[in-house]
Image (cartoon, rainbow, N blue to C red):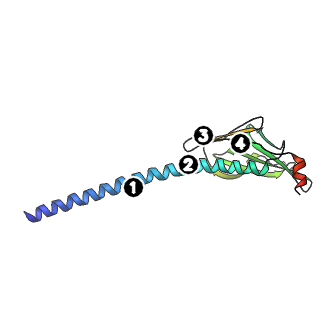
Amino acid sequence: MNVLFTMLLFLVFVLCALFTVLIGSRVYENITVRSNANYTGNTALSYIANKVRQGDRAGLVDVVDIEGTQALEMRQEIGGAEYVTWIYWGEGSLRELFTDASSGLGLKDGLEILECQGLSLSKEGQLIHIEIPGEGGGRLTLSLRSGGLDWDDEGE
């Protein structure tokens, strides 16, 4: 009888330990999925915000339609040549293309930056509205604060 009771108690202990591990693994999996979703949305918004802040020049940042796709366009002049950066969503990911304005490259030539569920862009005056839809997505509104091209020339 003592052996049977001990074995039964041990079996209950093993079952409790097993259920604890199973429940813990599901909680961990849920946390990981949420964390990855938040990482994607936050990282995409931070990436775009930093690119806009780097390229903020008077009249050189805009939201355009290229080949039926919304893109954030940032123009700049380097060594007398005009270059353009397009940030857009295509093929299931946030993509970027930096090229000479006359190169003839299109959106299909851009590099994948980060997988996400989409990208919505709009511009109203000096405000750029950015939205990453889906789970873990988010919204961001940026104000273009460039002082003008004359100020940039003085800093060189």
Asked whether, in this view, residue 134 is left or right of residue 31, the answer is right
Cα gap from disc 2 to disc 1, whole angstroms:
20 Å
**Residues at badges 2 and 1 in contact (C-beta under 8 Å)?**
no
Going by the numbered disc 1, the residue's amino acid type is: Ser
Residue 125, image x and y in percent? 78, 35
Look at the numbered disc 1 and give the secondary structure of its residue: helix
Residue 140 point in image, percent of width and height: 65, 42
- Disc number lying in front (4 or 1): 4
Dot 4 amino acid type = Leu
- Residue at 66% across, 45% down: 91
Query: For numbered disc 2, what is the local secondary structure?
Result: helix
- Residue 89: x and y in percent read 68, 44
- Does label 2 or label 1 sit earlier along the sequence? 1
Disc 2 versus disc 4: distance between alpha carbons?
A: 20 Å
Q: Earlier in the sequence, mark 2 or mark 4?
A: 2
10 Å crowding of disc 2: few (<14), some (14-19), many (20+): some
Other residues around mark 3 within 10 Å, as few (<14) / some (14–19) / many (≥20): some
Reading the image, the residue beneath label 4 is 142
Say which quadrant the N terminus sits in: bottom left
Which residue, given by chain and number where applicable, does mark 2 sit on?
38
Foreground residue, 42 or 95? 42
User: Viewer-nearest of labels 2 and 1?
Assistant: 2
Task: Name the mark on residue 133.
Answer: 3
Q: Distance from label 4 to label 1 (Cα)? A: 40 Å
